[in-house]
Image: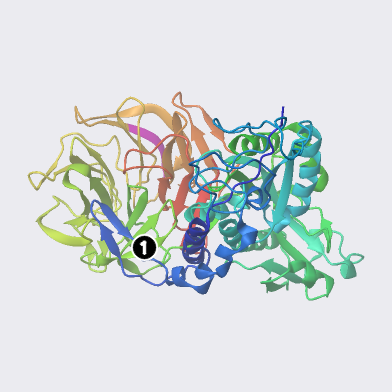
Amino acid sequence: MFTPSLSLLVPSSSARAHSRLLIASLTASFLFASCSKPKIESEPGGPPRPESSPSAQSPAAQSPSAQSPSAQSPSAQSAAPSSAPPEGTEPSAEPGGAPPGEEPALQGEPPAEGTEEDPGQGGEPSVEAPEATAPAAPLKLRVYVPPSLGKTFRELALKYATVSPDVTVDVVADDLYETLRRMGDEGGDVLVAEGWGAYEAARAASVVRSDGVTVVGFLPIGVSVSGAVRGEVSAVTQLSGRRIGLPDGRVSTAPDAARRLLARAKLEKVQEVVIPGNPSSALRDGTIDAYVSWGTLADAGVPLDVPVALEELLPIPAGLTAFTKNDAAANAFLTWLTTDVARETFGCQSAIALPAEGRRKCPTVIPIRLPEPRRQAGVVSLNGRVGLFGGDAGGRRLASIVWVDLTAFGVSTALATLDAPAAGVTAEWVPSSKAVYLFGGETAEGLSDAVQRYEPATDTLQVLPLRMPVKRHAMTGAVAHDKVFLFGGIDESGAASAEIHVFDPASGTTATLTATLPAPRARMARAPGNDGTLLLLGGDEGNTALPSADVVEFDASARAVRRSTLRLDVPRSAAAVVPWKGGWLVAGGFTTGGLSDQVLVMSAQGEHRFLDVSLPEGLAEAAVAELGATDSGGAESGGAVLLLGGITRDRVDARLIRLPE
């Protein structure tokens, strides 16, 4: 009996050409996105989509390598001797290959029904078939990794061969952009990435699958010094006055982490040198004295120990590519990467860190930004996208509407704008009206009582003839029973309010409820409760800006308010809150001790615990969305969380920060 030999199947020429076109367009727009305002194309029932990148027509997308024989499946280029095909069977499209539209036949298959093999009836002597005991060729898995993980994964491939001798792991180490191009041409099975930002770029280019993604480890921030200064530098704190190399920020999130390390180490007179090419060469030829990035460069420099207080850990996601035909073998390899044997290799190579008590995991800063720094924006989640309405850019109010695609991570600016630049606008999506309603806000002329309606399908905005009962900004909104409820906010005196207002889109009327909040509050976070109620968390008193730890429950059916038995760990306002694994995840916010960088998980029973992931720095007033959320109140539980914009200690932010799952 023959043992089949499996070969890696890659896409056809036309499929590879289509993949390269997607990769050239999507990765270029993702990795090298500018802050220009593209023309918007609308689609029925959804927000405007980013305009297609002109790079989709680049010469790279039309590369003749799509027709190169090297891209063909190995099994299609080497056919074993066989008998003639049965009568009526069409010839293969390629010598020795399968007929068009069919998979190649495995070697050693029995002859098709209706054919004869009878060497004993006269004529020329027949040639005997090869022995059936020939060993099968090992299955080959192609695994793409970033350069920082190349050495480690080659060692892992050798160890994996001892536990799975029937599988050969081919490790390809290259930067993200070249990896995506190569996968489009050559196929592959597994992609390993530095952080979720890189993995989302691959997802946007449609070269990885959404299922089967595993965090296989964490990559630490690393410092490598050149051999020329090794005798003078034995600790990170001795790098003052040195030339420090950093990666190119367009293709890596490491520069932000590197600068945080340099700031925490209190280094002086450091000369930062951005290295767009090979950092190993820069260390060898003396262009730089040290290099700071994710992982280390042991092949070119000498790694320094990084104190725990300065260290950050970046998630390393790994998952199946869109081209793999070896699901079972690829998933088995991913599972093995989380075993003790693999983790021992991680530790020996000093390239992948094992999470430990007190070690700080760092979220991914997505390598695209909002068109302007933005805080206090109205926000809605709709069909896998987040819309930001108005906001403050650091003393300059905004009228623009920005959409962020949570699947492809494209950023687009709508043609429509708010009636006037405003911060603190409350935005709510009403499904029955297929529109976003905008309430109040703070303009250059003062507080507003305007009600505006924006239709994503047509990208149009109108100011409605009705007005809110009062002028407010920094209210918290929620939709229930096709009505919009507005809680608290800041009034014209600068104080917080305890009032609750309701807007009915069907009748076009607004009213003030008899029920009020237990205390005046502004900048509260909102989240759905587990019992069908609405939770309002924290907030502050406006003028005094004293935050609260209270959690308030609102029953929309009874229009009743009560103080919950739940409480935040500390008083917080303007925090980011989403449902998470049966409880709630609370990130950042203003506290009595200043801006928080902590990520708190509060259970339904009121228990508190902190994740070993913290924000890159203290952050408040950021828009928040959960990947996979379908509308403003329907976030899935336990997914990845994205923070957009906000305010840090020294600036208004334009970053997109993805917390690890």
User: Residue at coordinates 58% horizontally, 46% vertically from top-left?
Assistant: 614
User: Residue at coordinates 64% horizontally, 33% vertically from top-left?
Assistant: 109
Q: Position of residue 333 (x, y in %)?
A: 68, 37
Q: Position of residue 251 (x, y in %)?
A: 59, 64
Residue neighbourhood size for the residue with mark 1, other residues' Cα within 10 Å, grouped as few (<14), some (14–19), many (≥20): many
Q: Residue 110 vs residue 484: left or right? A: right
Q: Is residue 158 above or below residue 172?
A: above
User: Residue at coordinates 46% horizontally, 26% vertically from top-left?
Assistant: 606
Q: Main secondary structure of the magenta part?
A: strand
Q: Residue 254 vs residue 501: left or right? A: right
Q: Is residue 267 above or below residue 139?
A: below
Quadrant in the picture for the C terminus: top right
The range drawn in magenta is 546-552
Is 548 in the magenta?
yes
User: Residue tagged by mark 1?
Assistant: 50
Q: Is residue 63 visible?
A: yes
Q: Residue 412 vs residue 271: left or right? A: left
Q: Dot 1: what SS?
A: loop
In this rendering, the count of numbered labels is 1
Q: Position of residue 37 (x, y in %)?
A: 36, 71
At label 1, the amino acid type is Pro
Q: Is residue 343 visible?
A: no
